[in-house]
Image (spheres, rainbow, N blue to C red):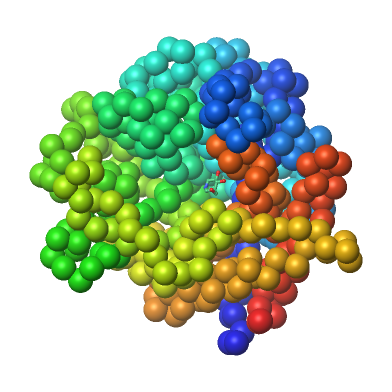
Amino acid sequence: MEKLIFPVDFLWGSSTASYQVEGAAHEGGRGECIWDTFSRKPGAVYAGENGNVACDQYHRYEEDIALMAELGLKSYRFSIAWPRIIPAGKGKVNPEGVAFYRRLCEELHRKGISACATLYHWDLPQTLEDAGGWPDRSILGAFEEYVKVCYKELGDLIDMWITINEPLCVAFLGHLHGVHAPGHRDLQKTLATVHHVNMAHGIAVKEYRKTGLKAPIGITWNPTTPRPAVNSDADKKAAEIARAMNTEIFMFPVLGKGYPKLLAQETNYTVPIKDGDLEIIAQPIDFIGINYYHESPAAADEDAPFKFSMKPSWQETTAMGWPITPGGFERQLEWIAEVSRGAFGKAEIPIYITENGCACDDTVTADGKIHDRQRIEYLYQHLAACANVIKKGVPLKGYYVWSLLDNFEWAFGYTKRFGIIYVDFKTMKRTPKDSAYFLRDTIAGYGEL
Ligand code: IFM
């Protein structure tokens, strides 16, 4: 198959998130977060598992960074745990938490790896949830306080900032479907969360610009851009509603286009906006982060709350049951380049893939290795999609694989392995899978199957 070719300055990285890898949940002065509470709820997480130990990166970050360096990775995307920095959500800053992230970044820099920090990847301090959480507008004051502390304490060490990871999951999985913390099933709370997460992003960027720090700042979305199941007007409309409801509702206000009209027209749903909010949300950003895993077909469905539902696909699936759809990745990236072109008066907004990868049923074979051929093929196909869209003019500047390590996959606990590095959760031994070496070779310019 054709060799993968990327621009010389293409940024290669790997991604993780605090609750999924750090562990040390009750160490270093960290406060409780909503995932600590949610994972104690019977039936919420597979086998009652939790992130108490996870990959123990809190103690093993040097080993993890050494592995990144061996693979030629140039950037590490991690998230800052709000309850490690401000354990009670508001008020007292925890110096031990700050010191941990400073040590992490310093070690990354020593190994020539840049630090890409996500400010919020779902571990909300429990005290703030108790005060109303994301559906309550008072969260915005607390978030502002938290991000200012991060900029002040870590600003000299962070090379790239991401405000929020996947607002869609925060709002819909956590507040409508109840499958993520805090586990609500409430439409009004969901719509309020949509708006407050968008506002939190805008506030984070606005405050960042006041600091004079120069590292780029952006947001990470996981856009749903489905294809219509059937080539009919009804299914084409369903695909548009799905995109409006799951993607444009987050992306368009940030890009200065306001909330998608289709939302109110087709569903009668609105978000709780106050005067001036849209201006706050639409702060100029320096890049767009995209997390892509798969594309599904959408069909009209009068019985569904938003009048669409997702239909089965024919493609081979990963261990998550997600179809492997690199074609959808290309379509999505072209669409994002198109809708973001000209935003904030800029000709184009750089795009980074901040997550892409797949879960496989990996096993260690007798030779001590992990021959994850399906992941290699998945990565090859999705990287080929990236290379193709770059040729077509999409301003794609980098790619972070999800994930560096097998880790705590939220409600699935430790049953879904997304890492390019295998983690034995009993011994914490790390073993690079074949896919890690495939990625190393691709970074070095030898990406071929
Ligand atoms: O593990 C998650 C991550 O936290 C957010 N994006 C999707 C990944 C795989 O489900």
Up-down relation of residue 81 to residue 240 (above or below): above
Q: Quadrant of the N terminus?
A: bottom right
Q: Nearer the viewer, residue 396 or 302?
A: 302
| Residue at the extreme right of the image, as rendered | 367
Quarter of the image with the C terminus is bottom right
| Residue pictured at 57% horizontal, 69% vertical | 378
Question: Residue at image x 49%, y 22%?
Answer: 145
Q: Is residue 72 left or right of residue 189?
A: right
Residue at (61% x, 30% y) in the render = 81
Tell whether 160 sits left or right of 274.
right
Percent coordinates x, y for residue 246 in the rendering: 32, 47
Closer to the camera in the image, 365 or 181: 365
Q: Quadrant of residue 342?
A: bottom left
Q: Is residue 401 visible?
A: yes
Most extreme residue toward the bottom, as rendered? 1
Drawn side of residue 51 relative to residue 289, left or right? right
Is residue 355 positioned above or below 374 on the image?
Answer: above
Instruction: Identify which residue, 370 or 351, lies in the foreground.
Output: 370
Nearest the viewer among 228 and 79 is 228
Residue 270 % position (x, y): 18, 34
Residue 364: which quarter of the image? bottom right
> How many numbered circles does the render carry?
0
Return the x and y of residue 242 as percentages of the image width and height: 27, 52
Question: What residue is at 20 percent from the left and 55 percent from the top?
Answer: 300
Is residue 14 visible in the rendered structure shown here? no
